[in-house]
Amino acid sequence: MENLTEMLKGTLEGCVLEIVGGEETYGYAITRRLNDLGFADVVEGTVYTILLRLEKNGLVQVAKRPSEVGPPRKFYSLNDAGREELAMFWAKWQYVSSRIDSLKEGGR
Amino acid sequence: MENLTEMLKGTLEGCVLEIVGGEETYGYAITRRLNDLGFADVVEGTVYTILLRLEKNGLVQVAKRPSEVGPPRKFYSLNDAGREELAMFWAKWQYVSSRIDSLKEGGR
DNA sequence: TAGTGGTACTCGGTGTTACGGGGTACCCGG
DNA sequence: CCGGGTACCCCGTAACACCGAGTACCACTA
């Protein structure tokens, strides 16, 4: 599937939030996770951008820890604000996707 | 629901395409349609921006016709390229939304 | 020991998209 | 004749994802 990028705007951040909410993890692994999930062309730079934004907005907690196979990793986990934001994201997603699906099905 | 705007990026154009594909219609009516559909804060300027983009990209056919209740309307309908684009949009939507839903459900 | 490839993060610039606000203009009823 | 609904357009702004380049750590190998 080519060029999903525009459609991901505004949802990719939520996806990252969900992944981080599931377990404490770091940028490089999140990118891999997204790629495996089917978002094949999501690229590292994008994920790091999102993570820095989440950090700036106070939605995550960060812990730097050494790795045995490369440079140190920045592990992210959600704080309360982050969990709240995540819940909000899913509410929005449900709303938007239901609207769009209803438009698709004859759309009344 | 507040501030869905970011989540609509990349999908709003598809929604307009779908509406135009359903019947020949014009900007002002499309805006109303979207508002009724639940996208309450989609605003006229946005729809016109999209319509002009569709026109520029050769996805629609345009016909100006007088109105009995105001200034003339620009009626839009899909051409072959537009129908193709619309089919593409729904394919992308299905793909993306299924991926995101699967992420939501435990995400394997 | 120099080189390669995988791991891991950061930054600056770019393009696309939707919004906000203003402007123009047509039409009808009071 | 003037306000409000109808109808369109344009310009500037903000958000978001991408791209490319840079830095740096580690293990393996020739």
Image (spheres, coloured by chain):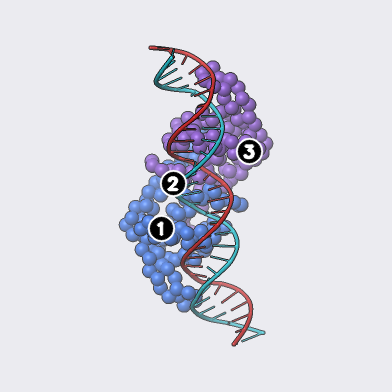
Chain colours: A blue, B purple, C red, D cyan
**Disc 2 designates what residue?**
A93
Residue B56: give its label.
Answer: 3
Name above or below for residue B60 compared with residue B98: above
**Residue placed at 57% from the left, 22% from the top?**
B72
The amino acid type found where label 2 is placed reads Trp
Density class for disc 2 (Cα within 10 Å; few <14, some 14-19, many ≥20) is many
Residue displayed at 51% across by 18% down: B69
For the residue marked with disc 3, what is the amino acid?
A: Lys
Report, in whole angstroms, how far the alpha carbon at label 3 lies from the one at label 2. 30 Å
Q: Secondary structure at mark 3?
A: helix
Which chain does the numbered disc 3 sit on? Answer: B
State the mark number for residue A54. Answer: 1
Q: Secondary structure at mark 1?
A: helix
Residue B67 in the image: state x and y as whole percent. 55, 19
What residue appears at the point 51 percent right and 58 percent down from the top-left corner? Answer: A46
> With respect to residue C24, does C7 lie above or below?
below
Q: Please tell me which of labels 2 and 1 falls first in the chain.
A: 1
Q: Position of residue D13 (x, y in %)?
A: 46, 45
